[in-house]
């Protein structure tokens, strides 16, 4: 028999989905639900709160709403006297409730004051709620608490407390000065991480209240030598640049940072660049002029950060009438851009979108309200028992049939590590690879080509023998007669870049060099580019060995590979290629069935990604296994599900990242469903592209 408590929870959850016909019916429902607020079980209490919040949306009487808010406060406060785990769940739910109805707990802020023995996760949640409930009426109490928290021993909690003071200053205009006074008192304590966090939040306060609290800048500058964290440095530099005209020695302060400019992290370099430009525009004297020339030179010539380099080029052109000469006179355009009025930052205490907040409130007392995510963000599809077929032989306790049943299937087809992948045997059309850009952009890759780069080696050895045709990436018609065809391939456990050079010009071409821009897989040349001098009408093919994870680019994984090639007779040519993930599939990617099952179960459901290939038809399971095995995608097992065949494969890329792959199809009919589970789900789209390409052969 079901426990009566959980029975009440289920009934309340069901009622919360019922929409009352009018305000009167909503009031009647709430009246019957209100006694559940006194229940001893926290799940029943939270479900009752959810039910009341939903019905309150239909109640128009302000007196009824006010009374209901008063009735909900005591049970929510009572939840905070339970054990820490229940406190945490209650706090996550309360966090949502006060964003929608802050009046419910507006007078109960003291119950959220942190106790010395509260676990850190409870303290962090209490801080967030205190910020949301802070008002002009209780701000003095709140600041006293935050100031005390800022002297504790837990560094993360101290940082969060200092940041909370800044957020209160941004939220409450009339309390900003009191918040700044507390921050200055904390700075005088001279605790390094407290000082740095205070400077970060004061920068935001300056953004929120421009030209109001600049008198404290002198105090901040006294702590300049203690700054060693990137965000704190960047914040202090922003303050100096923003108020350079009011700081007598602003040039000296910025110059102290310039000494270590090449070693600074990107966010500090970007702020230093902008602050120096601001200083020059506000004080166009000889000192700042020399500083701006040094900074622009460092940011354009001595860096490989494209963001920094591009911003420096923009500033250089804004500051100079001729981009080729030194900075001479600031232009009005530069002032309009660099010194433009900045948008005022706002209170971020209520961070959730209103529609998302409503959805989360409708899911109070569930995991959704603890994660602060809608259910579909972390709940994935699952089979029910009625969907399983007779031949499904799942182990007991498994939640996902298709993931655990890698039932009896034939042995994996054998493969040789030296088998040449499909890329060496199939030539896609140029449009399928990547079209060449319509017009060259000289500065697109910045310092991609440089004769002093050790990775660029002149050709002095004969090319490799010719092989299957390659996709054309650089057509001769648009590149002064030079045509380049290329494709990545895997051979004997090594990644190569197979290239074909064709000289359709009227002169001999020699001295070929190549360079790869930073990319998601760090592909770079592992040896010299071996191309002999090409007479008019001649062609040569070569295999360039590659290394991985040497030239990494930040950001989400991308299949884009940017390449630059030059020779002694022509300018640098740029073209784009596409990285196919299957060339990274290693020869040791085969998994035993038990290992496959254990790995699948160990990965969270959120790591599973699904897609469909509607235009692909699998004519034979055996042929598909052989085709995938040739590119190191190894067969694990096969099973029948209704009239569909389900095939399981494993693959692995360098650094030991596995891909567990499930293909579902009706043999002989178009349409393939593909699911993959991997520790790095952001790579799933690239895996799908590779599998789709292999199936199309």
Image (cartoon, helix red, strand yellow):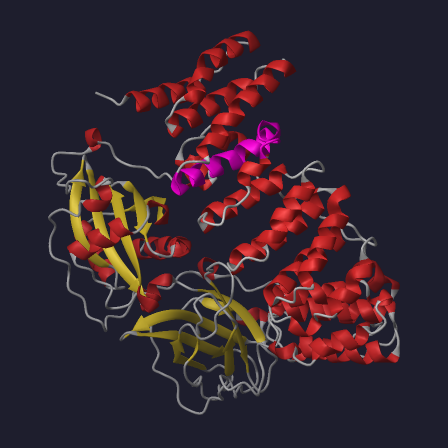
x, y (%) of residue 586?
A: 28, 68
Quarter location, residue 653: bottom left
* Residue 94 forms part of the magenta stretch: yes
Quarter of the image with the C terminus in it:
bottom left
Q: Nearer the viewer, residue 337 or 244?
A: 244
Single out the residue that lies furthest toward the bottom. Answer: 460
Q: Nearer the viewer, residue 275 or 332?
A: 275
x, y (%) of residue 2?
A: 24, 22
The residue at the point 60 percent across, 82 percent down is 570
Quarter location, residue 462: bottom left
| 394 shown above or below 332 | above
| 527 shown above or below 487 | below
Magenta span: chief secondary structure: helix
Which residues are the magenta region?
83-108
From the viewer's perspective, tell me whether residue 632 is left or right of residue 327.
Answer: left
- Label total for image: 0
The residue at the point 53 percent across, 21 percent down is 71
Quarter location, residue 230: bottom right
Is residue 241 shown to the viewer in this render? no
From the viewer's perspective, tell me whether residue 484 is left or right of residue 603.
Answer: right
Q: Nearer the viewer, residue 441 or 183?
A: 183
* Residue 459 forms part of the magenta stretch: no
x, y (%) of residue 32?
A: 45, 11
The residue at the point 52 percent across, 88 percent down is 511
From the viewer's perspective, tell me whether residue 366 is left or right of residue 508.
Answer: left
């Amino acid at each position: 028999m079901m426990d009566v408590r959980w029975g009440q929870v289920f009934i309340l959850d069901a009622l919360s989905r019922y929409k009352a016909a009018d305000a009167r019916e909503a009031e009647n429902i709430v009246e019957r639900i209100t006694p559940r607020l006194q229940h001893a079980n926290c799940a029943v209490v939270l479900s009752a709160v959810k039910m009341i919040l939903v019905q309150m949306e239909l109640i128009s009487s302000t007196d009824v709403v006010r009374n209901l808010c008063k009735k909900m406060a005591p049970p929510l406060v009572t939840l905070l006297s339970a054990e820490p785990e229940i406190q945490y769940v209650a706090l996550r739910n309360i966090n949502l409730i006060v964003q929608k109805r802050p009046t419910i707990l507006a007078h109960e802020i003291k119950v959220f004051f942190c106790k010395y023995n509260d676990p850190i996760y409870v303290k962090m949640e209490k801080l967030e709620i205190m910020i949301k409930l802070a008002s002009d009426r209780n701000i003095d109490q709140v600041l006293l608490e935050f100031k005390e928290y800022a002297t504790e021993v837990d560094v993360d909690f101290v940082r969060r407390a200092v940041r909370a003071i800044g957020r209160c200053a941004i939220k409450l205009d009339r309390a900003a000065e009191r918040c700044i006074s507390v921050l200055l008192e904390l700075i005088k304590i001279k605790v390094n991480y407290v000082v740095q966090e205070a400077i970060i939040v004061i920068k935001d306060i300056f953004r929120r209240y421009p030209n109001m609290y600049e008198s404290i800048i002198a105090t901040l500058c006294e702590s300049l030598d203690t700054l060693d964290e990137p965000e704190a440095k960047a914040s202090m530099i922003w303050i100096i640049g923003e108020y350079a005209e009011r700081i007598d020695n602003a040039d000296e302060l910025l110059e102290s940072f310039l000494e270590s400019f090449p070693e600074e992290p990107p966010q500090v370099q970007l702020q230093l660049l902008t602050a120096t430009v601001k200083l020059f525009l506000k004080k166009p004297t000889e000192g700042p002029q020399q500083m701006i020339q040094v900074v622009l030179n460092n940011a354009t010539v001595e860096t490989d950060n494209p963001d920094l380099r591009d911003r420096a080029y923009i500033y250089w052109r804004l500051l100079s009438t001729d981009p080729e000469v030194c900075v001479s006179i600031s232009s009005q355009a530069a002032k309009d851009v660099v010194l433009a009025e900045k948008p005022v930052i706002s209170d971020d205490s209520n961070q959730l979108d209103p529609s998302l907040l409503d959805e989360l409130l409708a899911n109070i007392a569930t995991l959704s309200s603890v994660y602060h995510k809608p259910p579909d963000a972390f709940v994935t599809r699952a089979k029910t028992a009625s969907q399983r077929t007779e031949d499904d032989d799942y182990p007991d306790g498994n939640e996902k049939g298709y993931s655990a049943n890698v039932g009896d299937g034939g042995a994996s087809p054998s493969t040789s590590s030296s088998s040449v992948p499909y890329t060496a045997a199939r030539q896609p059309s140029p449009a399928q690879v990547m079209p060449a850009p319509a017009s060259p952009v000289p500065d697109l890759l910045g310092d991609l080509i440089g004769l002093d780069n050790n990775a660029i080696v002149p050709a002095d050895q004969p090319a490799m023998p010719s092989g299957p045709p390659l996709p054309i990436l650089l057509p001769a018609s648009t590149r002064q007669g030079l045509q380049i065809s290329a494709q990545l391939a895997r051979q004997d456990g090594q990644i190569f870049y197979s290239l074909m050079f064709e000289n359709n010009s009227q002169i001999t071409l020699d001295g070929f060099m190549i360079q790869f821009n930073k990319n998601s897989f760090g592909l770079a040349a592992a040896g010299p580019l071996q191309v002999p001098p090409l007479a008019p009408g001649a062609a040569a093919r070569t295999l360039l060995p590659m290394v991985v994870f040497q030239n990494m680019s930040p950001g989400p994984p991308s299949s884009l590979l940017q390449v630059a090639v030059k020779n002694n007779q022509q300018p640098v040519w740029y073209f784009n290629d596409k990285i196919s993930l299957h060339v990274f599939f290693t020869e040791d990617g085969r998994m035993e069935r038990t290992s496959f099952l254990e790995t699948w179960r160990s990965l969270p459901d959120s790591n599973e990604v699904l897609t469909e290939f509607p235009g692909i038809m699998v004519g034979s399971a055996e042929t598909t296994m052989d085709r995938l095995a040739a590119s190191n995608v190894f067969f694990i097992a096969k099973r029948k599900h209704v009239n569909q065949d389900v095939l399981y494969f494993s693959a692995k890329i360098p650094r030991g990242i596995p891909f567990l792959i499930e293909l579902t199809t009706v043999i002989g009919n178009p349409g393939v469903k593909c699911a993959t589970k991997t520790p790095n789900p952001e790579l799933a789209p690239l895996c799908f592209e590779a599998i789709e390409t292999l199936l199309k052969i």
